[in-house]
Amino acid sequence: MKIYKGKIMRVQPDSLAEELELQVGDSIIEVNGQKLRDIIDLSFGLADEEIELLVEHPDGEREIIAFDKDVDEELGVEFESAVFDGIQRCKNHCVFCFVDMIAPAMRRTLSIKDDDYRMSFLYGNFITLTNLKDSDYKRIEQFHLSPLFVSIHTMNPELRVKMLRTPLAADIAKHLDKLETAGVEYHTQVVLCSGLNDGEELERTISELVSRRPSVLSLAIVPVGITKHRRDKFKLNQFDREGAVKVIEQVERWQIKLRQETGQTFIYLGDEFYFLAGHDMPPEEYYDDFPQLDNGIGLTRSFISDWQTEEDSHSEYEEPIHIDVIAGTSIAPVLQRLAGEAMRQNNNLTVRVLPVVNEYFGSTVNVSGLLTGIDIINKLKSVDGEREGILIPESALRSGEDIFLDDITLSDLRDQFPTSRIEPVQSGAEFKRALTNFHSYHKSRAEETNYMWQSNAGYTK
């Protein structure tokens, strides 16, 4: 059996790992004689109370570290990768694949197309199921890796083959049957392309997925995104205002019906549809418990709700303060409205919301999470005036790291504007605190982790 190594990237202070003198750069190879493929194996191995770790140090020396631990005691390390044997690559050539549309010469990791069930389970990454082997299904069942996140796009077998460009895509119903037989629940997604899988095709997809409840936990429908770097000759059409209105009306009929029957909305539209149509976001209850928030579903409504529930600051700025807010063009009007509320409560506060056109990927890419450092720098340099503070969307930074998609770091950005304090914000509550009490606001990202699955093994903290 091939030997895989889990290389330690971070050791948490005051953790069991620190007590055991594990160091950054050490690699864990075995737990109690069990070789490891990923942190899932590691987690189940660390569920025992008596542990023997086989550790390889950076100089190649190996050591067995034996210790006792409580059942729920965490190890306290993070790894360079959640999978030690390499990410399962996607062999599809989807007509809408965003990875195929990224700018050239970006860092290599952005070009990795994964279709790995473990990344789906751990991070919420969507998988097509076309790249799974029988052994993968057996392991999914063995460890009950649930829920997973599945890219459906269409339940029409012939159309799915056309969209994913693999004959294996036709077996979507059989693949879902396998998950359900294994007792696995799953969230689903449809990337909707105008004139391709919308209209009657979308109706079929919704109907078939609704019939698979309760195994299907939710359905997210997001509009296709196209960057200026797309070279694929397959014609894709994005939605315009009229098309977005039709999608909203079609989905709303299902939402109303399902809420009447079950009290749950089940089907959720990407925020972009509402922005395109010029419609307000649905009320918070329509998003249930925001099951696909990490997919951007309900992000705007969640942001507004967080802002509204955050207590108002009753302290006013004694001196004038000027804050610039960086935003994608789609969310900018919402932020402007909220900033207006803050300014009306404090006469010394001046806020400028600066919508940043995405020159790096193309102007049709309008979300804050895909803004690059260079576009942010150029926007800030294009406007004059006072600014004591700059707020940037935390979603534009790589999870767990202070780096933008174009490899510009947060430190690089701060060096460009040394007279302004730059702080990231994520939630509506943070945005409100940053605007109304900027002198005390600071967002630390040092403890951030982005694993979805929490176990008793402590590899996430």
Image (cartoon, helix red, strand yellow):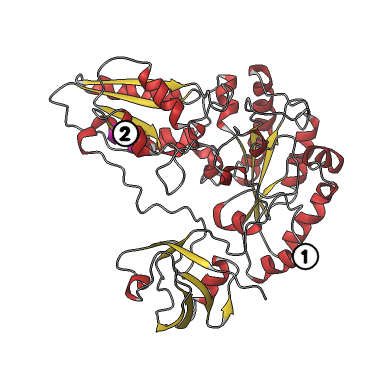
Taking 92 as reference, is 245 left or right? left
In front of the other: label 2 or label 1?
2
Q: Quadrant where the C terminus lies?
A: bottom left
Majority secondary structure of the magenta segment?
helix
The residue sitting at the left extreme is: 318
Q: Residue at x 41, y 70 (%)?
A: 74
Which residue in the structure is indicated by mark 2?
414
Q: Is residue 226 magenta?
A: no
The single residue placed furthest to the top in the displayed view is: 384
The residue under the point 85% across, 43% down is: 157
Q: Position of residue 339 (x, y in %)?
A: 33, 24
Q: Amino acid at mark 2?
A: Arg
Kind of residue at badge 1: Asp
The quadrant holding residue 199 is top right
Q: Alpha carbon of mark 2 to alpha carbon of mark 1: how far?
A: 50 Å
Q: Is disc 2 surrounded by few (<14), some (14 to 19) or many (20+) residues within 10 Å?
A: some
Which contiguous range is marked in magenta?
A: 430-434
For residue 293, above or below residue 73: above
- Residue 134 marker: 1
Helix, strand or loop under label 2: helix
Displayed quadrant of residue 44: bottom right
Left or right relative to 330: residue 229: right
Residue 226: percent from left, percent from top: 65, 28
Location of residue 253 in the rendering, given as x and y in whole percent from the top left corner:
68, 31
Task: Please report the residue visible at 82 percent of the width from the left and 55 percent of the height from the top.
Answer: 174
For the N terminus, which image quadrant?
A: bottom right
Q: Is residue 94 left or right of residue 433?
A: right
